[in-house]
Image: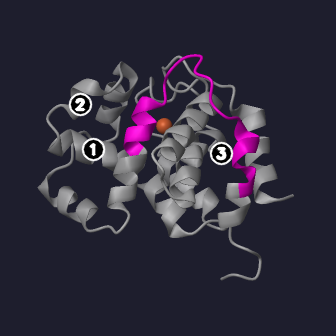
Amino acid sequence: MSISDEIFALFNARGHTAYLGEDVSQTEHALQAAHLAAQEGASDDLVVAALLHDIGHLTNGLPEDIAERGIDGHHEHAGAKWLKKNFKPEVTEPIRLHVAAKRYLCATEPSYHAGLSAASQRSLKIQGGPMGARELGQFESSPHARGAIRLRRWDDEAKVPGLAVPDLGHYRARIEAIARKPSEP
Ligand SMILES: [Fe+2]
């Protein structure tokens, strides 16, 4: 099974589930995020990162309403870990850091928090709230901080019910092109 087959199987099995308190499914959310990235002319690495940024929600097997129960499933870590074998840090690091990017933006951009959806504002609390000074410095020192912030903004926008965007198959070639080949370290 190719990596894109493996990913699509996950979306087909679990992508219809609701995206955490929003009016779109996990698959719709992923496709909208990838489409926004592509429209902005982002690299293939970042387009695929946008498509797969919440795959941890599909792989971790935790109940859908976990955030409502006040539990942080750390889906960003689960997703990055699951993808690590097949993708380079340019893909997995913005994914791992996309929750940190929200906490970063809440601390540094006064208008950002108000623009978040209600569900995203609620989950911020269990994700640790806005970053403190020390965490801000740590986050900024990552070479993938900028990619994570761009990904975060697509994530925040990708919640439009019924929006028509390209389907999963549209991204197959891009996924295969940037995935590690078996001979690569
Ligand atoms: Fe998301």
Q: Position of residue 100 (x, y in %)?
A: 33, 50
For marks 3 and 1, the one nearer the N-term is 3
In this rendering, the answer to whether 118 lies above or below 5 is above
- Which residue is painted at 57% across and 58% down in the image? 44
- Which residue is painted at 69% across and 57% down in the image? 175
Q: Give the foreground label among 2 and 1.
A: 2
Q: Which residue is mark 1?
A: 103
**Image: magenta residue range:** 152-173
- As measured in the structure, the alpha-carbon distance from the residue carrying label 2 to the one carrying label 1 is 9 Å
Q: Nearer the viewer, residue 128 or 48?
A: 48
Callout 3: SS: helix
Amino acid of disc 1: Arg
Amino acid of disc 2: His
| 71 on left or right of 53 | left
Judge whether residue 159 is colored magenta. Answer: yes
Q: Position of residue 144 (x, y in %)?
A: 38, 63
Q: Give the foreground label among 3 and 2.
A: 2
Q: Position of residue 151 (x, y in %)?
A: 43, 47
| 142 on left or right of 60 | left
The quarter of the rendered structure image containing the C terminus is bottom right
The quarter of the rendered structure image containing the N terminus is bottom right
Mark 2 C-beta to ligand 1 under 8 Å? no
Number of numbered discs overlaid on the protein picture = 3
Q: Position of residue 20 (x, y in %)?
A: 51, 26
When asked about the image quadrant of residue 124, the answer is top left
Numbered tag placed on residue 113 in the rendering = 2
Callout 1: SS: helix
Q: Nearer the viewer, residue 111 or 39?
A: 39
Amino acid of disc 3: Thr
